[in-house]
Amino acid sequence: MNRDKAQHRIEAIAGFQEEFGRLQGMGLVALAPKERRAIKAYHDEVLADLGAHYELDAPAGPPAWGMRIAAVTGALVVAGLLAAALDAVWPSMALWARIAVALAAPLLLLALTEALRATGRRRYVVGLAAALAVTAFAGGLQAMAATMAMPLGLPAWLAIGLFAAALGQRYNLPVLAAAGLTLAGGVLAGLVATADGAAAAALFDRAEPLLAAGLALYLAAAVMWTLPCPVRPAYRSAGLALMAAALILLSHPGNSLLAAFAGVPPASMAAIYQFSAVIAGFAVMSAGLKFGWRDSLYGGLGFLIVFVLTRLDAWFGEALPDAVDILALIAAAALFAWLARLVYGLETARQER
Amino acid sequence: MPWSLRTAVAVLILAFAGLGAGAAFNHVGAPSGRLIVEECRLAAAPGGGLLADLFGGPPSLAIQTETFYRPAGPRRPLPAVIADAGLDAGGAAMHGFAAIEADGPAVDAYAARETLGAGDPRPLILRDFARDYDALARRYAETPGVAVARAVLSAERRDGVLRPVVAPAVKRPALTRIQRAYLASLPPREAPCRSRFLAEIVYGALGNPFVAALRPLQRVNP
């Protein structure tokens, strides 16, 4: 082996680690912790050996958190300075100039994101540019609505959610995709719940459309199982978030549209939803454990924890003194930590099998 | 171009196009009313920058209103109005339209109830609410000094009685660049306020306001 071949081997190992991490994130492959540790130990040994023999450095690993924070801060400062400059000239700008700025800002940031991706920049840099593009889109719509004295309704928020979800899909950014899908799903549910002209807050009293939107997103991820979708976990996470919010709302009497239509007493309907919430939480966790979906496994656990806490608060919150409340909270935290550890153990055992 | 990128660009363009088309229709369609309002009856502040537009900072010009239920024609009891909107059981606020009066019997009655003096600025009065635009537009078509505005109806309990509260959906009327420049050129208001201009505020086809003209008032020195 010569120096060039050694360099090639080092880069191949780095490429394997990066791609394998991506496949693991998508849930397409799962190795037992024991096997992961064995591969890492082997690679560390090879890298140390090649580095020592040929005086080569291993390729840079993932960027440090300090670097990421500096990049985010820098981007925010630049965006803030641009906004302050625009703020000064905004009152003297004609309508056409305002429209041009509002439209150009997200389009330019979108072009920048595309250029960063094409030139192979790190994913967090691409993600930062994509997040700024979404922010510029939302800001541009708000500025135009204020300029033209048009109320910014739910359809505008649907557009913002879809835009974020599309960028998350395009640039393989699960967090952005999940946020966009959650917003879009929530707004769609809001449009259905407020079809009679009620304000958006009515969604809290009529949470069934939210449940339907969440279920649709979660099932969409299952249907897409055979399709190449790098952000499939984002669909599951968004669906889970919407379902969790809906079930927590519906577990309170009086928040169900169905109860009013079906003539069921609110308390009975709430009890049905409480039972459904427990079943749904365990079903999602089981699916996560069976198929290796960590988002579902820990998302389901998180949902059950929040659900139980909200129920305990609703049932006993006012009856118990504050000191007992705090003690109960500490006991609950300890219990949930133990549960999380148990779930982690189950996950590890399943992977090792 | 991948479908996700095409979707993003299409959503972006459609959203701005929809907003622009709505604003254009509001301007060129049949207006729902025209109000002539003195400066002191409006809120005004220097500024109106981008950050004010984004985060609701001080506006160049804003409409100030009070709810005072005085519908034209036979007056319905308040509990019936609130129950029709589904607000009697603590339901969420409802979107709809309101009759906004600048000059007329409702403003006079409000001023009398609040014992406003001759020199005190009178707020614009939201005197009626309906879910349906056409019904309200027909009812006030022949009434001068009244326009139909997009509004939100909610209810609040005061002194044990549930009362309707109407708020305009848009408080800041659209201004042209020249109008903004004129407002920015004015020195701060004196106290007590002496109006320096009349604003002609038009409520467009969608019930959203824009300023058609700002007419300076001639001042005669004492």
Image: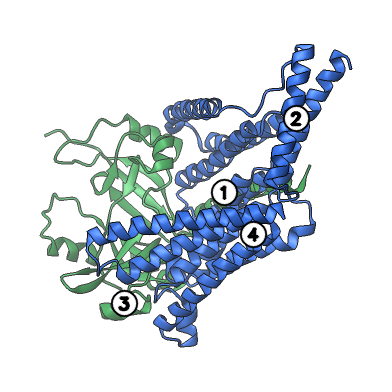
Chain colours: A blue, B green
Badge nearest the viewer, 3 or 4: 4
Task: Report x, y in % for residue B130.
Answer: 39, 72
Q: Which label sits on residue A66?
A: none
Q: Which residue is mark 4?
A: A288
**Do residues under tags 1 and 4 come within 8 Å of each other at their CB atoms?**
no
Q: In the figure, A190 relative to B36: above or below?
A: below
Quick one: which residue is furthest to the top in this view? A55
Query: Considering depth in this image, is A301 or A271 the residue closer to the camera?
Result: A301
Question: Do marks 3 and 2 share a subunit?
Answer: no
| Residue A288 seen in the current view | yes
- The first of marks 3 and 1 along the sequence is 1
Question: Do marks 3 and 4 share a subunit?
Answer: no
Q: Residue at position x 74%, y 63% from top? A: A223
Amino acid bearing label 1:
Gly
Q: Which label sits on residue A43?
A: 2
**Regarding mark 4 in the picture, which secondary structure is present there?**
helix
Q: Which label sits on residue B88?
A: 3
**Regarding mark 3 in the picture, which secondary structure is present there?**
loop
Badge nearest the viewer, 3 or 2: 2
**Mark 4 burial class by Cα count in 10 Å: few <14, some 14-19, many 20+:** some
Q: Which residue is mark 1?
A: B20
**Mark 3 burial class by Cα count in 10 Å: few <14, some 14-19, many 20+:** some
Quick one: which residue is furthest to the bottom in this view? A263
Q: CA distance from mark 3 to mark 4?
A: 45 Å
Q: CA distance from mark 1 to mark 4?
A: 45 Å
Task: Report x, y in % for residue A277.
Answer: 51, 70
| Residue B29 seen in the current view | no
Q: In the figure, B192 relative to A252: above or below?
A: above
